[in-house]
Image (tube, grey):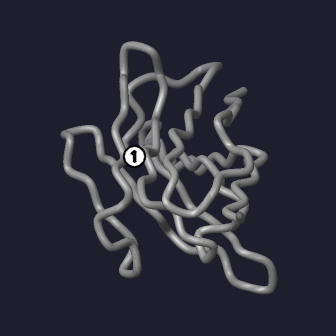
Amino acid sequence: QVRLVESGGGLVQPGGSLRLSCVASGNIRNAYAMGWYRQAPGEEREMVAIQFIGGTAEYGGTMEGRFTVFRDDAENTVYLQINALKPEDTAVYYCYVKNYRGADVEDYWGQGTQVTVSS
């Protein structure tokens, strides 16, 4: 059983910063990919950022450099630093982990943490 627990969301003023955290617990270690998706009201879920086990990171097409993903495999944790927050960043942010166990692919999701950007 693998569990992802996010933290760090909240209400932030435009221009502010947040750091989201996600801790993976259970039978998982050095997952192939760890990262974040988000879903705004009325919108589809979109990828924000993913970091792979080798260190390479990929960012969603609309994430213009204000987002940084990084992971600490010793702590089984992935972070998302968001700077210069905009109202359009308001969304539920979901932690995502992809793991390969032999020939099997496992996808795990957290329950989400709300980020609201408003003055």
Compared with residue 23, is residue 18 higher up or lower down, i.e. above or below? below
Return the x and y of residue 78 as percentages of the image width and height.
46, 35
Which residue position is annotated with label 1?
A: 33
Quadrant of the drawing holding the N terminus? top right
Crowding at dot 1, Cα within 10 Å, few <14 / some 14-19 / many 20+, comes out as many
Q: Nearer the viewer, residue 92 or 104?
A: 92
Compared with residue 48, is residue 33 higher up or lower down, i.e. above or below? above
- Extreme residue in the front direction: 119
Q: Residue at x 56, y 74 (%)?
A: 46
Compared with residue 1, is residue 19 higher up or lower down, i.e. above or below? below
Quadrant of the drawing holding the C terminus? bottom right
Question: Which amino acid, mark 1?
Answer: Ala
User: Element under label 1?
Assistant: strand
Q: How many marks?
A: 1
Return the x and y of residue 45 as percentages of the image width and height.
65, 74
Q: Residue at x 61, y 77 (%)?
A: 88
Q: Is residue 116 left or right of residue 105?
A: right
Q: Residue at x 72, y 84 (%)?
A: 43
Return the x and y of residue 19 as percentages of the image width and height.
51, 39
Compared with residue 36, is residue 26 higher up or lower down, i.e. above or below? above
Q: Residue at x 41, y 59 (%)?
A: 49
Residue 81 found in image quarter: top left
Return the x and y of residue 47 as percentages of the image width and height.
50, 68
Q: Nearer the viewer, residue 98 or 16?
A: 16
